[in-house]
Image (cartoon, helix red, strand yellow):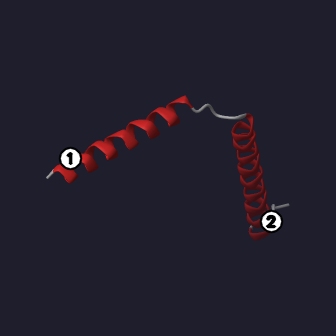
Amino acid sequence: MVSLAVAAVVLLALVVFVARRDRSRRPSDEDSAAVRRAAADQHRHDAQRQATSGLAERHRNPPST
């Protein structure tokens, strides 16, 4: 019974420690650069997919003259 209480206290202390550590952490410049890079990659991918889709559609249905 005592060992269960000790284990609970240790677990609670660990949770409090990790929560405080994570709360005090600030996003670094490297993280924001990675977010910007990922957004640019996603935009480029979407643009390429849209262009490819448009080319395929034009090839399937050529403009009438």
Q: Position of residue 56 (x, y in %)?
A: 76, 66
Q: Is residue 28 above or below residue 39?
A: above
**Disc on res. 5:** 1
Residue 39 occupies quadrant: top right
* Marks 1,2: beta carbons within 8 A: no
Figure quadrant of the C terminus = bottom right
Q: Which residue is mark 2?
A: 62
Amino acid, disc 2: Pro
Q: Secondary structure at mark 2?
A: loop
Q: Is residue 25 rendered to the left or right of residue 1?
A: right
Front-lying residue, 16 or 28:
16
Neighbor class of circle 1 (other Cα within 10 Å; few <14, some 14-19, many 20+) is few
Front-lying residue, 56 or 18:
18
Neighbor class of circle 2 (other Cα within 10 Å; few <14, some 14-19, many 20+) is few
Mark 1 to mark 2 CA distance (whole Å): 76 Å
* Count of picture labels: 2
Q: Is residue 23 above or below residue 49?
A: above
Q: Residue at x 73, y 61 (%)?
A: 53
